[in-house]
Amino acid sequence: MGIGKYERRKRGYSLEKQKAKMGVLMLLPSLIIISFIILYPLISSFVFAFMKKPLGSMSNDKFIGLKNFAYIFIQPLFWKSLLNSTILTFATVVLQTIFGMIIALLLNTSFKARGVIRGLFILPWATPAFVAAFAWSWMVDSQNGMINILLKQFHLVKEGIPWLMQTNTALFIVILAHIWKDIPWVIMIFLSGLQMVPVESREAAKVDGANIWKEFWYITIPSMKSIIVIAILLRVIWTFKYFDLVKLLTGGGPLNSTMTIPIMIYQQAFESNSLGRASALGVILFVILGVFSFFYFKVLSKDGEA
Amino acid sequence: MMVKKSVAKSVKILLIIFFLIIILFPIYWIFIASITPSKSFLPVNVSWLIPKEVTFDNFLSILSKSSFITYYMNSLIVSIVATILTLIVSSMGGYSLGRVKFRGRNFIGQLVLVTYLVPSILLVIPLFQLITQFKMQDSYVGLILSYMTFALPFCLWMLKGFFSSLPANIEDAALIDGTGIFGAFVRIVLPLAVPGLISAAMFTFLLCWNEYLFALVFINKDSLRTLAVGVVSNFVTVTMGPSDWARVMSSAILSSLPVYIIFLALQKYFVAGLASGAIKE
């Protein structure tokens, strides 16, 4: 009636154009901040990796090619840190996935006060890292820790074990603390994944007489496959780069027995005052994480198409 | 059949309780330490599981320390300002990435995801230099900006997903009225996006409140320290007596309180946000 077809299209077209312009404008603050505080620093750290760069003064900076990397690769501590980071990440993520799935399956059923109980399961994740570190140091304290109290109560040991102070037990406790801290995340992701399991196929399986295990392996797992893969990849990335909890629990000790790549970066930068070597280590970390991130992107985009 | 079912149900409930106890025990154990009178502190034994004597002296003692109050205020200021700033910037950016079509949008979206995965331990080195250059060490501004390195990509990614899940064309009516897209964003889209904004805000606040690395490296002045760094570097010493332990445990409980309250009160937003932040494309 009022507006003709042509006019409407013209108006729609200019609307789209105007919309796009405004859209770019609204994105601009984010882009500027990201460039300034993430992209520019990220690029600088790649440059630093090829420099001799003492902490403090910038006048002594100079390019030294691959020397930082050469130095790192001949350090036994680097290989030890890499191994520790790998063990920590692998053990943490495997156990988080298994127990996260068990707990998610339990919480996905109906029972009294479900909302409150689910909420309580989130608490370790919300706990600040330094509180988590206190909690676990206190749990395994040789005199006051519940673990040693129980061991003594059942006469399994005479003297409390100083778990975090022994080279052969510290990493084990660090792993436990990591599992504990982030398992709520895994539980919640799996819980939301369980909502996507089609009810019909579950009921069909029941009618066919499938038991719980069969239902789990043939119905639940396949329909949650991409969520499980995504959760594992993100957990691997986060655990591998996680600095706070190890730093606060052991600082990498005793005798470097819990030294990880992030702790080594910190020590190189702020204790050995070598920003160049620390950046080179950071680049190595970035490349390792890049591999997992690549797979994460792949799974995400495949998921998006489906 | 009925018997079998009820047995299965009891087993299930027992398992849930078992896991709940394991999950909550470390927190419960420091809570017990914080409410136990320091005279009856050592040695700890099994009888501690249920406290006989309860005191709040440890809490009062830590609250009367002016340094603790200072750390608490610093944590609050930095976390709240970083959250608000991030939300303002990322709600516009997320809207743009999620609902406006323009060239290069997909590329920028992927770039945001990449920046979301950049480890803080890598960024801390160049940021240290940048912050020193701009004389922002020992300042709220430096710390807040460094917190945005993880908060901003996270919120952009999460809100992008949230905005794109809103029904199509909701802003069209306003556009035809000539309000312009920014007006439509403020008046129509933002009110609908409140649940997404709440969950983005609670995640961001939690990440900032719990941050340790940047606060450790960029702040040297005691009066500007946040809780984590302040408590760890000032209250924890090698020669700690029972009353010191009790105080440290009270400070740990008090430091966790804001995030516990937020998460228990706003739990439904948490689950929705978690799923959209991590999984949605």
Image (cartoon, rainbow, N blue to C red):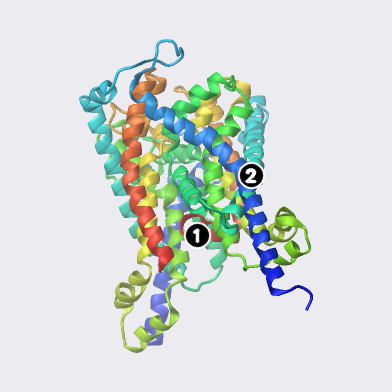
Quadrant the N terminus of chain A occupies:
bottom right
Amino acid type of the residue tagged 2 in the rendering: Val
Inter-mark Cα distance, 2 to 1: 22 Å
The residue lying toward the viewer, choosing from B179 and A125, is: B179
Indicate the position of residue A250 as horizontal and vertical percent values: 37, 31
Q: Quadrant of residue A60?
A: top left
Q: Secondary structure at mark 2?
A: helix
Q: For mark 1, does the 10 Å Cα neighbourhood hold few (<14), some (14 to 19), or many (20 or more) residues?
A: some
Left or right of A31? Residue A4 is right
- Counting residues from the start of the chain, the first of labels 2 and 1 encountered is 2
Amino acid type of the residue tagged 1 in the rendering: Ala
- Chain of residue at mark 1: B
Indicate the position of residue B241 as horizontal and vertical percent values: 49, 26
On the question of residue A12 being in view, the answer is: yes
The residue lying toward the viewer, choosing from A181 and A287, is: A287
Left or right of A294? Residue B21 is right
Q: Which residue is mark 1?
A: B275
**Does A197 appear above or below A70?**
below
The numbered mark at residue A283 is none
Q: For mark 2, does the 10 Å Cα neighbourhood hold few (<14), some (14 to 19), or many (20 or more) residues?
A: many
The residue lying toward the viewer, choosing from A44 and A231, is: A44
**Does A7 appear above or below B202?**
below
Q: Secondary structure at mark 1?
A: helix
Q: Quadrant of residue A284?
A: top left
Quadrant the C terminus of chain A occupies:
bottom left
**Does A116 appear above or below A129?**
below
Q: Which residue is mark 2?
A: B89
Q: Nearer the viewer, mark 2 or mark 1?
A: 2
- Whether callout 2 and callout 1 share a subunit is answered yes
Indicate the position of residue A273 as horizontal and vertical percent values: 39, 17
Residue sitting at x 63%, y 28%? B140
- Chain of residue at mark 2: B
